[in-house]
């Protein structure tokens, strides 16, 4: 029996479908696993409570100590009553400097700053900014970061 | 050289496997990406603290303001000492009405209500109900929602 | 028209690619769905507040009551000021025993214990241990567990 033109068409479709499926799905599974294995933690600070600020900074330090600072990304997001942690007169100012020097990203919510009439000049130098703290916390989780709320 | 019956069988298996793999895996990858890009946030209220109730409502409002109300789903789950936020005499009753009118879903935990001998008649009209607040919070995260605990 | 050697090579590649894609991607999709459907919840206790300890234990109990104890895995991680929940003199010691007897896993953070000069002899018998509570909370979320912070 001979191979017909329609059989050859089936073979061509198969070649496309099979190889496309292999190319599309296998790296995707690997990518998912790689993404799952990356250590990324976003820490929320929304209390106006110095003990909580220290606890959040302890959490960041312990993540780095246990996993190795090069093996984990840590971001602290302060908003609402937590914004005081990042002001110039913050009682934990020294620890903020240490944490950012150690590679922890620390950001302030600009919605909160506007509400409390705070300018960037009122905030610690080491601090970064996000338009909305709550959106940052959502986005990080969407990107696969773990969430910790001390 | 001719195509044997066994070769045709291989082609048939390939057609099934290749197309099934393509049909099964590629839409799945697309679906996952689409799901990841949807903005969905569940907000937990479990403190008996009016400042926290306002903060949770601020979080919901800021999510809608920053992303556009049509681009984000927000659900507030109140349980334990947080249930007071949703009672008829709630000090934030006006804001609850505004939030639900703006599309925020707000639900009360029926286990908590039973424990505190609260009937639906004791709760604000705008409020919805879930059998167990903690199970709702788990389910939403399983469905890919971000979790915020103000 | 006859099948050439090169055509047979294409068929062989197709067989490999198609079947490999099917074997690789379809169980993976099933596994993902199965993983998503497993009910697993990690509960954080980081407040030195007896009311929060009871609320965390209520959350664990309600998860088991609503879903069936065999249908949900629950782990409570105590760290920072929350460590008091698991000490020998804990006011909720009886409830800790009940919860672990009911299948809830309860673990103490060894970094916190070291900081507070607590030995295992100072802790309730039912308690387990993790090197770093915050790392445990990250790992569980990476594994797909939902996170609850009462």
Image (tube, coloured by chain):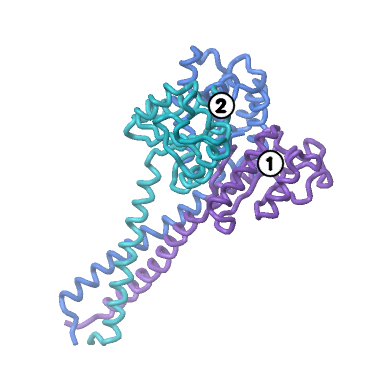
Chain colours: A blue, B cyan, C purple
**B28 and C90: which one is in front?**
C90
Q: Position of residue A97 (x, y in %)?
A: 63, 24
Please state, as top left, top right, bottom left or bottom right, where the N terminus of chain B lies in the image: bottom left
Q: Is residue A105 visible?
A: no
Please tell me how crowded label 2 is: few (under 14), some (14-19), or many (20+) other residues with Cα within 10 Å: many
**Mark 2 falls on what kind of element?**
loop
C-alpha separation, residue under disc 1 versus residue under disc 2: 20 Å
Q: In which quarter of the image is residue A95?
A: top right
Instruction: Say how many tags the image has.
Output: 2
Q: Are marks 1 and 2 on the same chain?
A: no
| Up-down relation of residue A32 to residue B93 (above or below) | below
Given residues B89 and C71, the one toward you in this image is: B89
Residue bearing the label numbered 1: C78
Rendered location of residue C109, percent (x, y): 71, 43
Q: Is mark 1 on a helix, strand or loop?
A: strand
Vertical relation: A61 (above or below) C106: above
Q: Residue at x 48, y 44 (%)?
A: B131
Q: Residue furthest right?
A: C121
Q: Which of B147 and A18 is in front in this view?
A: B147
Residue at 35%, 32% in the rendered image? B103
- Is C63 left or right of A9, judged from the image as shown? right
Q: In this view, does C76 lie to the left or right of B50?
A: right
Task: Provide the residue designation for mark 2.
Answer: A46
Q: Which residue is drawn at 31% across and 76% down?
A: B13
Q: In this view, does B80 lie above or below C18?
A: above
Task: Specify the subunit that label 1 lies on.
Answer: C
Tag of residue B17: none
- Whole-percent x, y for residue A27 in the image: 42, 57
Whether residue B61 is visible to the viewer of this picture, yes or no, is yes
Q: State which quadrant residue B102 falls in.
A: top left
């Amino acid at each position: 029996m001979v191979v017909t033109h329609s059989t050859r068409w089936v073979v061509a479709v198969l070649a496309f479908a099979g190889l496309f499926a292999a190319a599309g799905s296998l790296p995707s599974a690997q990518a998912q696993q790689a993404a799952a294995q990356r250590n990324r933690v976003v820490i929320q600070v929304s209390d106006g409570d110095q003990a909580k600020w220290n606890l959040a900074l302890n959490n960041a330090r312990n993540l780095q100590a246990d996993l190795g600072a090069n093996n984990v990304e840590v971001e602290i997001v302060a908003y609402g009553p937590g914004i005081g942690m990042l002001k110039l007169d913050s009682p934990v100012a020294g620890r903020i400097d240490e944490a950012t020097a150690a590679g922890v990203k620390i950001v302030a919510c600009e919605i909160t700053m506007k509400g409390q009439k705070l300018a960037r000049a009122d905030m610690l130098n080491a601090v970064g900014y996000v338009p909305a703290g709550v959106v940052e916390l959502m986005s990080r989780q969407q990107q696969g970061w773990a969430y910790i709320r001390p």
